[in-house]
Image: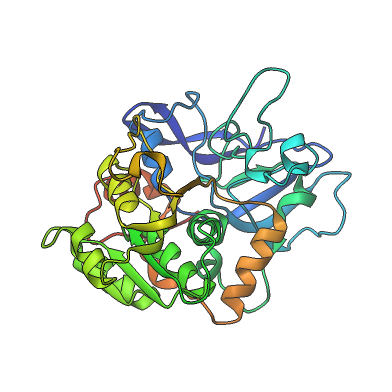
Amino acid sequence: MPRMKAAVFVEPGRIVLDEKPIPDIGPLDALIRITTTTICGTDVHILKGEYPVARGLTIGHEPVGVIEKLGSAVQGYREGQRVIAGAITPSGHSAACLCGCHSQDGAGTKHGWKPLGGWRFGNTIDGCQAEYVLVPDAMANLAPVPDGLTDEQVLMCPDIMSTGFSGAENGRIRIGDTVAVFAQGPIGLCATAGARLMGATSIIAVESVPARMEMARRMGADHVVDFTKADPVEEIRRLTDGRGVDVSIEALGRQETFEAALRVLRPGGTLSSLGVYSGDIRIPLDGFLAGLGDHTIRTTLCPGGKERMRRLMGAIASGRVDTRPLVTHRFKLDQIEEAYDLFAHQRDGVLKVAITP
């Protein structure tokens, strides 16, 4: 049986390069030869054992590649075509999908409630930090890459860009809004770019790493608050003349940033939460105004599906957003363990890494 190289979860603290059989595909599936992928913060949660997955699972959920083989029932695509697939791969026909919650595809089945059901790559099925990946429900998930766009131009679309933009979208930002974005890692930077595209006219980024502070300005931030030098809540209140922000986006997944994002809201404001939390989150009584502040708290799992990917690639092709600067390091698949060590420890100014077989 033909085999391939793949990054495999062994146990908490160990993701290693190994060999596995190249997947067999079913009638509705596609086999994609990976040309570029990356490592996500969620993969680091898996590495640390903070998010449980099966031992032996191939990790990764951000594929860019070429169609190697199509299932017998797949129509509208051709072998050799350049494609991406979202980190979330909805079937298109589940109850969650038909309710418009594609990310939660698979939740609420007869086997019980399973949140995050649409996230399958590197979670419930083998992912794409490998030479090949099986894409389920190919006709719902494969999005052709427009001619002229490089792998690195579209590499953020499957997850980071889709997630960050959805933070702005779920915040229901309006033209003229003031928005605060807490943390300027890759998702926060994309949330900053998304807020600008949505029409925010004052964007306040909260960050302390100089390179990320500068990147935040490139992605659309009007003000950058260094939380190591000033209380971000007080500084944001000062910048807004005491009014507070219309929308705050929490992009780190920490109790302190969640609380700060709540405390800076104007009455009736929206907290859009993007962080992946590894412990219980507490809502402070004063920040929540005892439940009487008309606040909205919204959470997001990365939207997927081919239409979402088409729209994101359209934004890139139009020149309205450029995520290439987020790729700061490049590795071969053979160097995946080295790449994880760099990314997990956030050394050398890393934002995102590009992995190529």
Q: Quadrant of residue 104?
A: top right
Q: Nearer the viewer, residue 31 or 217?
A: 217
User: Horizontal placement of 308 versus 71: left or right?
Assistant: left
Q: Residue at x 54, y 55 (%)?
A: 170
Residue 290's x, y, as percent? 35, 39
The answer to whether residue 126 shows anywhere in this view is yes
Q: Nearer the viewer, residue 124 or 339?
A: 124
The answer to whether residue 89 shows anywhere in this view is no
Relative to 173, say whether 8 is above or below. Answer: above
Considering every residue shown, the one lying at the far left of the view is: 229
Relative to 132, say whether 13 is above or below. Answer: above
Relative to 313, say whether 159 is above or below. Answer: above
Relative to 65, say whether 279 is above or below. Answer: above
Q: Nearer the viewer, residue 315 or 152?
A: 315
User: Horizontal placement of 149 versus 220: left or right?
Assistant: right
Residue 219's x, y, as percent? 39, 74
Q: Residue at x 52, y 30 (%)?
A: 57
